Amino acid sequence: MSRLPVIVGFGGVNPAGRSSLHHGYRRMVIDKLGTEAQDKTFASLAALMNRDGSTSAEDRQFILDHTLIRRLETNLFDANNIPLHKRATIKSTSAEAITFSLKRNHVPDNPPENWALKENEDGTVDVTVPGDLDILFNDTRSSRVLAAGQLPTGFEPEKLYQSRNHPRGLQLTVFGASDALNSLGISWDEVRKRVPADQISVYASSAMGQLDTNGSGGLLQAGLMGKRVSSKNLPLGLAEMTADFVNAYILGNVGTTGANIGACATFLYNLRQGIQDIQSGKFRAVLVGGSEAPLTPDVIEGYRTMGALAEDEALNKIDGVESGEANHRRACRPFAENCGFTLSEGSQFIILFDDKLALELGANIYGAVADVFINADGYKKSIPGPGIGNYVTVGKAMGVIRSILGEDALRNRTYMQAHGTSTPQNRVTESHIFNELASAFGINKWPVGAIKAYIGHSLACASADQLIGSLGVWQEGIIPGIATSDQIAEDVHQSHLDFMLQHREIETTDMDAVFINSKGFGGNNATAAVMGPHVVRRMLEKKHGKDAMTRHAGLNEAVVEESAAYDESMIAGENSAIYNFGVGVVQGEELTISNSCISIPGLDNEVSLEVENPYSDFV
């Protein structure tokens, strides 16, 4: 019997704020919300930003100004004073050799051959260098890219638990996974009572690894900066640490785990693993996520030299401005006249149950993942350049929705949440994909949105941002418009498309599915088809019957109350980060082992060793 991967929880953080209970989504459409929803959104952001929760107009304006895409702030680094070393050669201004003095412990272990050294009684060493002397001067530079999707100002993930110099991406992992689990409304211990340990899986990663000074950045820079490599630099810099931290310090998971990497499509790569686990019937609960903290000077400069990022000078040129500060708030302009994407940071997680478990526990039903399709580009001229694989992923995603919900639903009750990076190449190629397939499937005006306009491009988390933002649409009935784009660029294909430049209000039950599209460097294309909660309930009733849905509704009342209680505690400023360092550690000697099962202390369910023969047709 088929199993449906139901989305029962989600959480995290991005430049729009905390993700759980749709708060981050509401920040993007705050101008369309009613007074009560606006008040709660501001209160949630004030708590996250460590403000006093004041509702004054001045405080609200501060919150608006210090969320979403904006000018780089100095809490991460000073973009106008980025330290570097500048090579130089010193030449003597006379016929005499160059001489200088050093402390004895500052003399290189292996000084150049042309150095003559003379030790002094005061612990210094005189150095004489005939000819020229090559040196590195301390210097600074200003970044030519000053717009970024930064987390809300004042949010300090490192202070929420004993972070012990963890890289920022892992700090965000702890917050993001904790937010998802706490908002579930069901104790994870209750889940573990119902589900054997080997039927739970975790898939999460970053796309680039942890590149700040506490991770791989420090590993690679230490020697050149005159510092020592930390014992944590290398292991904590690995991309799979996102999943490892969840397993070791948040869930205590002994089930399946993995860290799939697919550039900007990374989250969907992991999501595909998760839904296949549930569809197989071998797994019942899955946590899928991603974390990325790429706002470092070197990463920004790396993307800039590729010509990928929106530089201030280019933004001003587009706006017809000769000088002055660029409009950083509108740096990302998907499908309009644009000049590059805007780098962002964040962490996002979703929780999937199979349909039976969701009903048994009275879980919240936010939607379900119909499928995720991944295809490469074939032969390519350029690794970062787009190719043909995304035509296949989008087409297959459309095909699966047609098969499940029918032709009319596909044509009239779906929309596309585009990758929409805001590069000139993306606006042409991605729009061509959508336009050609809309035509092929008989869609005349297919709605297209692109929320990177608000929060930027968080790499591994990008498609998770799109998915979680789309879940909010089914709650509030507002599709975020591409509000930073005044008009669609002339080279964008749109004969069968409807690019939503303004927020669009809909009846939530009139939109049956959303497509989440992602295009990554190297030909990593992925498209997910996600069905709305009203569709999922209809499907569940058909499979399990009205009585089962009635029982679920009764159980769900307590779950909704628990989710709301968590939300209120976060708005009140309580810290709910989960970090179980050294808690519940089980050694191999404590296991009870037989040839049929393994019993693990602390877990009610045994791990069965009775594995069916998957090749019974061959033996």
Image (tube, rainbow, N blue to C red):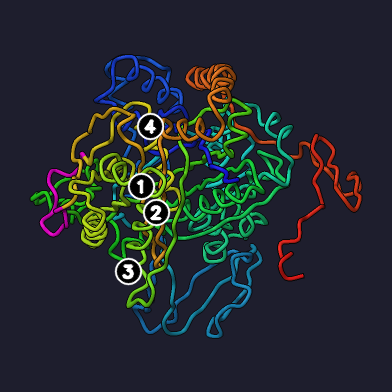
**Residue of label 4:** 472
Front residue of 1/307: it is 1
Mark 3 sits on what residue? 387
| Label 4 SS | helix
Q: Are marks 4 and 2 in contact (CB under 8 Å)?
A: no
Give me the C-alpha separation between circle 4 and circle 2.
19 Å
Q: 43 above or below 439? A: above
Residue position for label 1? 515
Marks 4/1 in contact by CB < 8 Å: the verdict is no
| Numbered disc in front, either 1 or 3 | 1
Q: Check residue 474 in the rendering and tell me which mark sits there, or answer none.
A: none
- The reply to whether the C-beta atoms of the residues labelled 3 and 2 are less than 8 Å apart is no
Q: Earlier in the sequence, mark 4 or mark 2?
A: 4
Front of the two marks 4 and 1: 1
Q: Mark 4 Cα within 10 Å, few/some/many (few <14, many 20+)?
A: many
**Spatial CA span between label 4 and label 1:** 14 Å
- Residue 298 sits inside the magenta stretch: no
Residue 439 picture quarter = bottom left
The kind of residue tagged 1 is Phe
Residue at point 65% right, 52% down? 257
Question: Looking at the picture, which amino acid does disc 3 mark?
Answer: Gly
- Residue visible at 54% across and 75% down? 127
Label 3 vs 2, first from the N-terminus: 3
Magenta residue check for 494? yes
Residue 335 x, y percent position in the rendering? 20, 52
3D distance between C-alphas at marks 2 and 1: 7 Å
Residue type at mark 2?
Thr
Q: Which residue is denoted by mark 2 in the rendering?
A: 527
Residue range (magenta): 483-495
* In front: label 3 or label 2: 2
CB under 8 Å between discs 2 and 1:
yes
Camera-nearest residue between 164 and 120? 164
